[in-house]
């Protein structure tokens, strides 16, 4: 039997989705990390109504 597992993730930052500028602060933070060589990306956490800046693989690189 084959089961799917989620890759480990590290959350670098959390931004409330209800902020006046919405996703922009999260995207800006992720862009700064990518410039530092950290492969950050933004995902939406519906349960907490937040944008998360994450790194897949469970560890920070840089």
Image: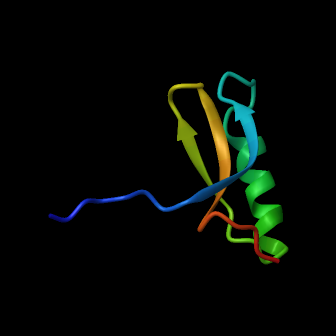
Image point (59%, 68%), residue name: 57
The image shows residue 2 at horizontal and vertical percentages of 20, 65
* Residue furthest front as drawn: 1
The image shows residue 50 at horizontal and vertical percentages of 64, 31
Quadrant (top left/top right/bottom left/bottom right) for the C terminus: bottom right
Residue 52, by quadrant, is top right
Q: How many marks?
A: 0
The image shows residue 56 at horizontal and vertical percentages of 59, 64
Image point (83%, 63%), residue name: 32
Does residue 50 sit above or below 42 in this rendering?
A: above
The image shows residue 61 at horizontal and vertical percentages of 76, 75
Image point (55%, 60%), residue name: 8
Quadrant (top left/top right/bottom left/bottom right) for the N terminus: bottom left
Does residue 50 sit above or below 4 in this rendering?
A: above
Question: Which color scheme is applied?
Answer: rainbow
Does residue 61 sit above or below 22 in this rendering?
A: below
Is 5 displayed left or right of 15 in the figure? left
Is 4 displayed left or right of 13 in the figure? left
Q: Considering depth in this image, is 19 or 57 the residue closer to the camera?
A: 57
Is 11 displayed left or right of 6 in the figure? right
Image point (74%, 25%), residue name: 19
């Amino acid at each position: 039997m084959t089961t799917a597992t989620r890759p480990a993730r590290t959350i670098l930052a959390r931004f409330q989705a209800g902020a006046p500028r919405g996703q922009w602060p999260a995207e800006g933070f992720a862009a700064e990390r990518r410039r530092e060589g950290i492969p950050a990306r933004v995902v939406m956490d519906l349960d907490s109504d937040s944008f998360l800046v994450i790194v897949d693989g469970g560890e920070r690189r840089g």
